[in-house]
Image: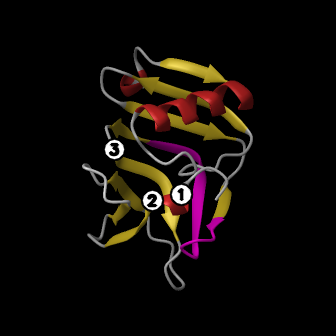
């Protein structure tokens, strides 16, 4: 795929997880935002911000502080920039009985302690950023 040209790629759970966490750190995003399991590969193209994470199986995670169930597909892709991920694919958040895709995630800059999740339908949900800290 052309969008993956020039990427730094890490294979295996340990190396992939390290890279994913370092990208979240570098771009000012909460470290628990992408709870991953059995990572196969993580890639990042610095020139465009395109990143992908492949894992062996879909992961569902419950963020206790905000009472949200989130689903992470076997492949999660998006464009990372300072305090945000755009054109996100592979992440869905449960709303009532539906699982609408999350298309964008943004942390307020300057910091207000809030993080925003936008869906393709134009719906935005805002939560405290600490709800997505590592270990949550």
Looking at the picture, how far across and down is residue 109, in whole percent? Answer: 26, 49
- In the picture shown, does residue 78 fall above or below 73? above
Q: Of helix, strand and loop, which mostly describes the magenta segment?
A: strand
Q: Are marks 1 and 3 in contact (CB under 8 Å)?
A: no
Decide if residue 114 is in sight here: yes
- In the picture shown, does residue 99 fall above or below 25? below
Q: Which residue is mark 1?
A: 132
- Magenta residues span 62-77
Q: Which residue is mark 3?
A: 83
Looking at the picture, how far across and down is residue 129, in whole percent? Answer: 45, 59
Q: Residues within 10 Å of mark 1 (few under 14, many from 20)?
A: many
* Quadrant of the frame with the N terminus: top left
Q: Residues within 10 Å of mark 2 (few under 14, many from 20)?
A: some
Name the side, left or right, on which 109 lies relative to 39: left
* Quadrant of the frame with the C terminus: bottom right
Which mark is drawn over residue 76? Answer: none
Q: Are marks 1 and 2 in contact (CB under 8 Å)?
A: yes
Looking at the picture, how far across and down is residue 135, in whole percent? Answer: 67, 53
Q: Which residue is mark 2?
A: 129
Q: Residue at x 63, y 71 (%)?
A: 64
In primary-sequence order, the first of circles 1 and 3 is 3
Q: Residue at x 36, y 71 (%)?
A: 125
Decide if residue 12 is in sight here: no
Q: Quadrant of residue 4?
A: top left
């Amino acid at each position: 795929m052309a969008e993956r040209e020039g990427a730094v790629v890490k294979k295996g759970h340990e190396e992939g997880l390290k890279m994913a966490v370092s990208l979240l750190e570098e771009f000012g995003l909460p470290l628990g935002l992408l709870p991953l399991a059995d990572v196969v590969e993580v890639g990042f193209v610095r020139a465009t911000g395109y990143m992908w994470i492949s894992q062996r199986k879909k992961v569902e995670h419950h963020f206790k502080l905000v009472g949200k169930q989130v689903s992470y597909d076997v492949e999660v892709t998006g464009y990372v920039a300072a305090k945000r991920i755009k054109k996100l694919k592979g992440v869905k958040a449960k709303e009532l009985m539906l699982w609408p895709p999350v298309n964008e995630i943004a942390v307020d800059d300057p910091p207000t302690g809030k993080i925003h999740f936008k869906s393709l339908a134009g719906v935005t949900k805002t939560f405290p950023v600490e709800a997505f800290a590592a270990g949550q």
